[in-house]
């Protein structure tokens, strides 16, 4: 997982975007080098999930990691069943 964080930081730096992850942010997923999903480890046992987009925007994707994970499982189940 540390490699994911390092990759995200490198991509942001190369993209010359004015954004830095907080020291307590944990990047757990990236998508094709232009978006990175993360949460702040200081925001409780089940923290909100955020996504960083390559143009510098950060958006909250879910109120908690468990909510985000459940929605991803449902979404992938629908994709597989289609």
Image (cartoon, rainbow, N blue to C red):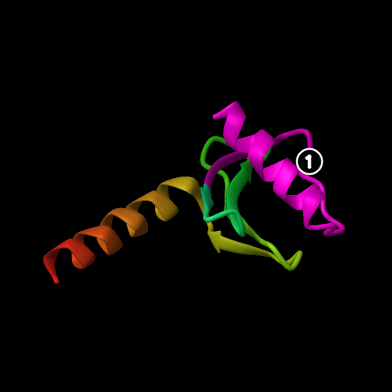
Q: Is residue 3 left or right of residue 76?
A: right
Answer above or below: position of 8 versus 62.
above
**Foreground of the two, 21 or 35:** 35
Q: Residue furthest bottom?
A: 82
Q: Is residue 80 left or right of residue 52?
A: left
Q: Is residue 46 magenta?
A: no
Q: Residue furthest front?
A: 14
- Position of the N terminus, as image quadrant, is top right
Q: Is residue 25 magenta?
A: yes
Q: Position of residue 35 (x, y in %)?
A: 60, 58
Quarter of the image holding residue 10? top right
Answer above or below: position of 76 versus 10.
below
Label 1 element class: loop
Residue drawn at (65%, 39%), measured in percent from left and top?
7
**Foreground of the two, 38 or 56:** 56
Q: Which residue is under mark 1?
A: 22
- Position of the C terminus, as image quadrant, is bottom left
Q: Position of residue 27 (x, y in %)?
A: 60, 41
Q: Which residues are magenta?
A: 1-29
Q: Residue furthest top?
A: 2
Q: Position of residue 72 (x, y in %)?
A: 35, 56
Instruction: Confirm whether residue 41 shows in the render.
Output: no
Residue drawn at (61%, 59%), measured in percent from left and top?
34
Instruction: Confirm whether residue 71 shows in the render.
Output: yes
Q: How many marks?
A: 1
């Amino acid at each position: 997982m540390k490699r994911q964080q390092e990759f995200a930081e490198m991509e942001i730096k190369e993209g010359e975007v004015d954004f830095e992850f907080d020291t307590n942010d944990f990047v757990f997923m990236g998508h094709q080098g232009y978006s990175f999903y993360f949460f702040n480890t200081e925001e409780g046992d089940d923290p909100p999930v955020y996504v960083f987009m390559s143009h510098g925007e950060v958006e909250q994707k879910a109120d908690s990691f468990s909510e985000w994970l459940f929605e991803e499982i449902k979404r992938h189940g629908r994709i597989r069943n289609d």
